[in-house]
Amino acid sequence: MAQALFSDTIVALSTPPGAGALAIVRLSGPAAVDLTAAVFSKKNLTQAAGHTLHYGTLRDPDSGSIVDEVVVALYRAPRSFTREDVVEISCHGSDYVVRQVLALLLRRGARLAEAGEFTKRAFLNGAMDLAQAEAVADLIAADSALSHRVALNQLRGGFSQELRELRGRLIKFAALLELELDFGEEDVEFADRTGLAQLLAEVRAVVAGLLRSFELGNVIKNGITAVIAGRPNAGKSTLLNALLREERAIVSAIPGTTRDFIEDEVSIDGLRFRFVDTAGLRDDTADEVEAIGVARTRERVSKAALLLYLFDLTQMSPEEVQAEIRELTQGLDLPVMAVGNKTDLATPDAQAAFASAFRIPDAAGPETPLVFLAAGQGQGLEGLQEALVRQVRGSALENTASATIVTNVRHARALEAAAAHLAAVQAGLDTGRGTELLAADLRHALAALGEITGEISSEDLLTSIFTQFCIGK
Ligand code: GDP
Ligand code: ZN
């Protein structure tokens, strides 16, 4: 095995602090096993093979007192998370016990790990690349089925593999350029310039696809903010309650009672939505408090990813609804969904009038989709949820040819830089710029891609990434 990079042994609590049935204290480094053996009842631990479990007691050798009954899991380098010797001590999950165990190991010579230091070691020891290391943090934070799947794919190297292929193609391109440089004569050109242009176009398309996937990636990781707006008494608070299935917003029959934004998150089919209930919109702005609410509603709509315009089917005409949607979204590029509420009170004629003026979500067409429901009765919610998911997935996914979804801002920035350098290569090819200049742009593009997986990385970058982790990760 290669020379170990780190000579010290780090220790930290790897489970969340606070009382629990169990807590796990993790050690990594060359002395991980010896340190543990020195305070563990089974002295032959130092001889034990990797991937084994050992039950025993931890004892303070100075005082002789027993600290806890524990199970020690032992991993031998390089077959461990960090590729170093790793010990995981499962002890009882009280803060007191954990403090005792940590103190015991620190006194024997372990050092308290910094934030993200286990994962950083895993990266520096070559167990994973940088994109995979970052996926560890994402996986820990994942709180929906889809964000979990994306993080897991990244952790397992799906994204890294795609980047490697991309870099491979660019290196092939660079090799062709170098070949031309070697000949050095102006009249010696690539045997196949069109093949070269095609290779570049392919690479640029992949980079562009990855960048577009960031739109969806961002939605998956951070959720999508949907503002529920509409006139007072349309049923906004009722709808929010129904969606959240709990009484968070105040429902009232007096128009204009919802003055503050009430918001919460719901996961629908693996996507995280953040719904914001707003004060009612109305024409009469004489009421000062209400007027402030309207202005703030417009501001919130401008920051949202989706507008749910909710209206009472018995109170408005299709023309009025369309006029209010236009007014709310003026100057904004924002998807809108019209939601007709109180189907239990509406006449079939009224519904039919709306259905022909709007689009029902399944039908193709660029118009605003329309959903009918009775929020107060809890009817039609599933239709709304399906339409919401279709709206988000449809708009983001149809642009995403790549199986990989970029969720990390750092990765997106690097891809943007790569795309810009590749565009410069393209421009250079088109205008017949010198081969040296093309090669330089290409190197920049390769460097930008290399930053994502950490093939090219600086200490500053690593510090900024790993300090975002918690201690113990
Ligand atoms: P908001 O001002 O838009 O937030 O409206 P609310 O959610 O406070 O609802 C206004 C009134 O409409 C309340 O009395 C609700 O119970 C009622 N409401 C909401 N949804 C429905 C529905 O689907 N059918 C009927 N009949 N009443 C509803
Ligand atoms: Zn309300």
Image (cartoon, helix red, strand yellow):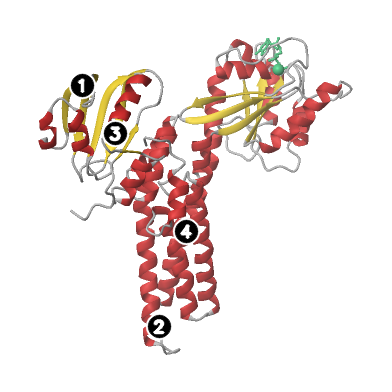
* Secondary element type, mark 4: helix
- Judge depth for marks 3 and 2 and give the one in front: 3
Read off the residue under disc 1: 64
Is ligand 2 closer than 8 angstroms to the Cβ of mark 3?
Answer: no
The quadrant of the rendered image in which ligand 1 is seen is top right
The residue pinned by badge 4 equals 205
Left/right of residue 211 with respect to residue 308 in the rendered view: left
Left or right: where does residue 427 sit relative to residue 287?
left
Do residues under tags 2 and 1 come within 8 Å of each other at their CB atoms? no
The image quarter in which residue 231 lies: top right
Q: Earlier in the sequence, mark 2 or mark 4?
A: 2
Residue 82 point in image, percent of width and height: 28, 43
Question: Is 360 in front, or is 223?
Answer: 223
* N-term mark: 3 or 4: 3
Task: Check disc 3 and report the residue beneath it.
Answer: 107
Circle 1 packing at 10 Å, graded few (<14), some (14-19), many (20+), is few
